[in-house]
Image: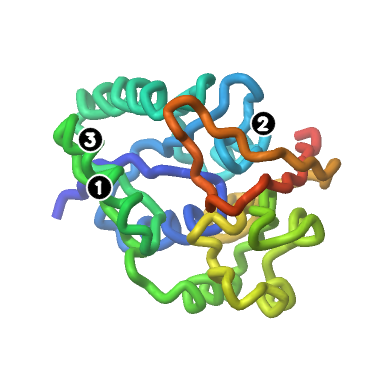
Amino acid sequence: MEKKKAIFCWSGGKDSSLCLYDVLQEGKYDVKYLLTTVNGNFNRISMHGVREDLLDQQVYQIGIPLKKVYVKEGSYAEYETNMEKMLLEAKSEGIDHVIFGDIFLEDLRKYREDNLAKVNMQAVFPLWKKDTKELVQKFISLGFKTITCCVNDFYLGEDMVGAEIDSKFLEALPSNVDPCGEYGEFHTFCFDGPIFKNKIEFSKGEKVYKPVEVKEDGVCSSSPKTKGFWYCDLVPSPY
């Protein structure tokens, strides 16, 4: 059976890494490109705050070409316009599927499906409705390694940003925090594992606190009780 051409929505974190691993193992889709949204003002992965240089290193070690969608205003309108342009370019190459690592946020799934429907493309969710405790344990058992690069201060404190996700980290999570951070409690940067040819080397820089900023069109992905986010700057090692 001929594989279906697809783009993989790559965040650089653990869920993306595990999802990509599963997709490549299954062999149903021919992943032609990875796709990442980058903040063009700071050259960092949107929301995660990871430097673009580290994103490029991930892509190099994975070996799949990357398409970047740059945003500067941070509005839904800008994001959707730039994303649609990129998707139409991909569609012209015969790509009809976009793969996401989302697990159980119904509103996010609908938002993705509705936007893809505008360009007659189909969303694929390989991890959908799977148990997050089992997923994170599978991630660790496969030999993946990841570090928290951003945490939501409504759920976690400064001490939890810049921490490697292992059994000790999971045991320390409050009961209201999903093991995969599916509600936006934390974001991660994956630096080693079976999808990478080599481990990505980096060092931990300063920790920075950034208060929530709500844009004019109401863009805010955090809880209403969130006051801000802690970020750990991850500094690429020379290569």
Report whether residue 177 is seen: yes
Q: Label 2 sits on what residue type?
A: Asp
Residue drawn at (58%, 35%), measured in percent from left and top? 45
Residue drawn at (54%, 50%), measured in percent from left and top? 224
Instruction: Give the foreground label among 1 and 2.
Output: 1
Q: Quadrant of the C terminus?
A: top right
Residue drawn at (65%, 62%), measured in percent from left and top? 155
Q: Nearer the viewer, residue 87 or 129?
A: 129
Instruction: Give the foreground label among 1 and 3.
Output: 1
Report whether residue 25 is seen: no
Disc 1 versus disc 3: distance between alpha carbons? 12 Å
Residue at the front extreme? 225
Disc 2 versus disc 3: distance between alpha carbons? 27 Å
Residue indicated by mark 2: 53
Q: Is residue 67 left or right of residue 87?
A: right
Q: Is residue 24 left or right of residue 28?
A: right
Category of crowding for the residue at label 3, using alpha-carbon neighbours closer than 10 angstroms: few (below 14), some (14–19), many (at least 20): many
Q: How is the image coloured?
A: rainbow
Residue indicated by mark 3: 95
Placement of 29 over or under 168, stated as above or below:
above
Q: Label 1 sits on what residue type?
A: Ala
Please identify the quarter of the rendering in which residue 46 is found: top right
- Point out which mark residue 123 bears: 1
Q: Is residue 195 left or right of residue 188?
A: left
Q: Label 3 sits on what residue type?
A: Ile
Q: Position of residue 130 (x, y in %)?
A: 37, 72
Q: Quadrant of the N terminus?
A: bottom left
